[in-house]
Amino acid sequence: MPQVPQTFFDALAVRTWCGLALRALGHAREEIDAINVYPVADGDTGTNLYLTMESAAAAVEAVFDGHGTLTERKPPLADAAQAMAHGALIGARGNSGTILAQLLRGMAQVLAADGETAHTDGEGLRLALRRAADSARHAVAHPVEGTVLSVASAAADAAGDTQGDCGTVARAAYEGACAALAATPGQLAVLERAGVVDAGGRGLVAVLAALVETFTGEVPVFTVLEAHARVAADETHTRVEDVSTSGATAATPCEGGPAFEVIYLLEADDSAVTRLRERLDALGDSLVVVGGDGLWNVHVHVDDAGAAVEAGVEAGRPYRIRITHFGLGDVHTTGAERPPRERAQRAVVAVVPGEGLAGLYGEAGATTVLARPGEPPASGELVAAVRRAHAREVVLLPNDAELRHTAAAAAEQARAEGIRVALIPTRSAVQGIAALAVHEPERRFDEDVVSMTSAAGATRYAEVAVAERQSWTMAGICQAGDVLGLVDGDVAVIGADVTATARAVLDRMLAAGGELVTLVLGDEAPASVADILEMHVRESYLAVDTVVYRGGRQGALLLIGVE
């Protein structure tokens, strides 16, 4: 964590703020989840805010990694601010996380307005907070007072009435947010009945407290507000059950409301998104559409989840689609308490690089986390998948060498929640396929893990991809556009033709023997490559079988496994 305080709002301050905000939301996550009663009493607002901020912080760290670690090589403010906004956008979870993503995007639009500026001051921070509040309110189809939108507007108003440096402005915004948060029960009847403040607003206060700490080095004290929140956290579980049984947990717009939450990223132009807003608004409620420049995050509660996704297809290209069924007996739909679902004994959770493999792993019974090219999942997303698997024992397959630390952190957190987790350090999805093929949930846990680990370890892996830039490799210098064949993570072949390079890679791998070749084709791979490679293996290597899968948009043109 960079040292605080920061004098100006520069790239280092963006990085510091993201790290401190993530830590603050981590500490407050359970408290915020406990007071979550609007718009749906599903107890996940704190978790959603944490996951959204974790994605933003990871994107900023990636920008710093690309510029080196020396202070003089820190990235421009515009790069850090835009990375923060993009990371939050692609990682946004739930209603609250989606709004937080738009708040950060609004700030980034001001901070990155002049791409050459190294830093901004208190005046720039005031403008950024104002843009954040206004853009978030605009993103919500039907803004409701007494929510995070009210808290954000109050923070911007207080900052606008203040002169001074970044620390002075940040503290004014924080104090304005605290006052607005304390007033939320008087603005929204559902909060008053439950005796809590707005959960999303409480999360924003934590984020603004981190902003104060960034510029002053001091952690603000919540005083009366903190006491209110603590009392609420202690009492809410009982209160939520009481009011949900009486049908009082939802405000009027949500009583007897839709049964599904639908979230997806969408590649589309502005005019198409305008039409999409109108269609989704007619389908359901809690509509929030954030983003811009061709990439959007769409969130809505509907009864017809298929229609919501189809609307996205008509507008552009939706992906990373998440559909959550609030469920029969959910407080959102009937006001009745849903009986707890029995935990399975064992489950497999796997990170997969494309929709095709997600389907394959899903058919084999695994709970999957989709990793888009350039969008690795954060540890919180893996923890959420472990929880979603709802099992006493979980085998975790990261399927990427770069995710080993992220997966280890997720496994440790899940263990702290009482789940027995075994992390198998798979470095490619083809190793995960091999492990899943020998998975037997009826075996003792340790025996199953040993068998899966052995199968993964006995599988050599490779990929064929296109070089994005000139660089030094183990096989020599490659140029942008060259076809690279990587074996066990290192470049082994540099070529100009995808099929020829893949064949050379296969020959290198099979020179040491093998019984089964697994090919996973990406969308951009030549249509004929699978047939040509299958024929090559059949003609050149006796008793070696080949299986082919379609991976979808997986980054690499081709994944290869040899067992």
Image: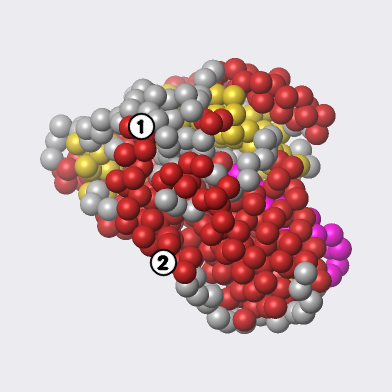
Inspect the magenta stretch and tell me whether residue 107 lies in it.
yes
The numbered mark at residue 246 is: 1
Is residue 8 visible from the viewing direction of this image?
Answer: no
Q: Nearer the viewer, residue 124 or 111?
A: 124
Which secondary structure type mostly characterizes the magenta part of the structure? helix
Q: CA distance from mark 2 to mark 1?
A: 27 Å
Q: Position of residue 103 (x, y in %)?
A: 67, 53
Magenta segment boundaries in residue numbering: 98-117
Q: Position of residue 1 (x, y in %)?
A: 53, 74
Q: Dividing the picture into quarters, in which one does residue 449 lie?
A: top left
Dot 2 and dot 1 residues touching (CB under 8 Å): no
Q: Position of residue 523 (x, y in %)?
A: 62, 28
Left or right position of 118 against 531: right
Q: Amino acid at mark 2?
A: Ala
Colour scheme: secondary structure
Is residue 128 visible from the viewing direction of this image?
Answer: yes
Q: Amino acid at mark 1?
A: Ser
User: Going from the N terminus, do you reach mark 2 or mark 1 first?
Assistant: 2
Q: Quadrant of the C terminus?
A: top left
The structure residue drawn at horizontal position 14% and vertical position 36%, both measured from the top left corner, is: 443
Residue tagged 2: 227
Left or right position of 338 against 40: left
Q: Dividing the picture into quarters, in which one does residue 239 lie?
A: top left
Q: Dividing the picture into quarters, in which one does residue 363 lie?
A: top left
The structure residue drawn at horizontal position 74% and vertical position 42%, both measured from the top left corner, is: 138
Q: Position of residue 165 (x, y in %)?
A: 75, 79
Left or right position of 418 against 80: left
Q: Nearer the viewer, mark 2 or mark 1?
A: 1
Q: Secondary structure at mark 1?
A: loop
